[in-house]
Amino acid sequence: MRSGAPDQIKSPRPRARPQDLHADSAQNGRPKLLRNLSQSGSFLQNLLVLAAYGASFTILRHSAARWATHNLFSVWFPAAGLRFAFLWIVGARWAPAAALAELLVSVGAGTVTLTAPLPLSLLGVVGPCLVYGGVIGLVHARTRTRGTVEPDPVAFATAAVVGPMAAGIASLPWALPLAGARGTLNPSLLFSALLDFTLGDLLGILILSPPLLWLAHRLWRGRWSAKIRAAELYRCGELLMLLTFAWGLVWTLQRLGDGLVLAPVLLAACWCGLRGGRSAGWAAALLTALLILPITEY
């Protein structure tokens, strides 16, 4: 002990709890632009972000019209992928603002026409976004992944599957009265349209949301380079050969008169995900969509 210096007893540093670490990483693990969305002083910035989102959503919605069945719903709806990624990053509480942006921009651009009865027509436009917000908010609360840019695989898969299904089921209260008012209430046709609604949203999420979330994560990290090992290159060649064989089997079955049987390709895509991880699974799904969508236009 040195003379003239008071004794200083350092108290032990409190150990951070896991939930505190997660809360801090959730707040700091978001790009600055997205963190500012929750601040009241950035109203103009919020407005610009929502306007850009609404415009992008409207463009993607309009592009999906080529795959619309019976002029109702599309079997390929990339706008759902944009909506999912946006709400996943900024948070479910922005679902009402995102729904309003979708409504205003779509109606203003003329891509959506509101018909009588007006309340049901409005609900048909904003309802899916609100349902997605509820599902994403529930998944974030249960898995403690709120505010994270890089999605947890289990949480992402749960929300990506439950979201389209919940939106399809929630569309019945407005789809049935609207179909009755238009005189097109055909049970089989309506069921087929709702199935197309669910599948179109699911496909849009699986194809578009992962690269958008990856881009947001890289923008935050500031790292773009990735090291590719020789083993990964060998695995990519192996998976590519598997997909080629699966597509060859599909082509053979079609030539034999069995129609377009996609079971071999779906199994190969699932194996790519199991063998090569998320990136390989997404690449296989993207390749399958690029080959199938051009021949399924209406």
Image: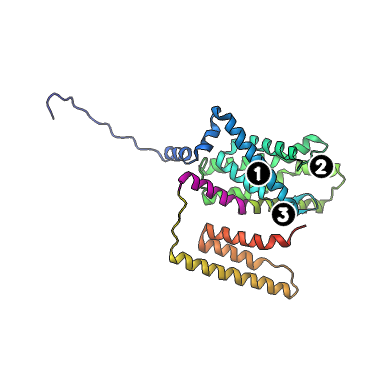
Q: What amino acid is at disc 1?
A: Ser
For numbered disc 3, what is the local secondary structure?
loop
Q: Earlier in the sequence, mark 1 or mark 2?
A: 1
In this picture, residue 4 sits left or right of residue 149: left
For numbered disc 2, what is the local secondary structure?
helix
The residue that disc 3 covers is 75
Query: Mark 1 or mark 2, which is nearer to you?
Result: 1
- Name which residue lies at 62% across and 46% down: 82
Q: Is residue 78 visible?
A: yes
For numbered disc 1, what is the local secondary structure?
helix
Quadrant of image for the C terminus: bottom right
Q: What amino acid is at disc 3?
A: Val
Q: Look at the image and give the residue range highlighted in magenta.
A: 205-222
Total numbered labels? 3
How packed is label 3: few (under 14 Cα within 10 Å), some, or many (20 or more)? many
Contact? badges 1 and 2 (CB < 8 Å)? no
Contact? badges 3 and 1 (CB < 8 Å)? no
Residue most toward the left? Answer: 3
Q: Earlier in the sequence, mark 2 or mark 3?
A: 3
The residue that disc 2 covers is 178
Q: CA distance from mark 2 to mark 3?
A: 20 Å
Q: As rendered, which of 156 and 239 lies closer to the eye?
A: 239
Q: As rendered, which of 2 and 67 lies closer to the eye?
A: 67
- Name which residue lies at 56% across and 68% down: 240
In this picture, residue 69 sits left or right of residue 93: right
Residue 185 at x, y percent in the picture: 84, 47
Main secondary structure along the magenta-highlighted residues: helix
Q: Is residue 217 magenta?
A: yes
**Residue 56, disc:** 1
Q: CA distance from mark 1 to mark 2?
A: 27 Å
Residue 295 at x, y percent in the picture: 73, 62
Q: What amino acid is at disc 2?
A: Leu
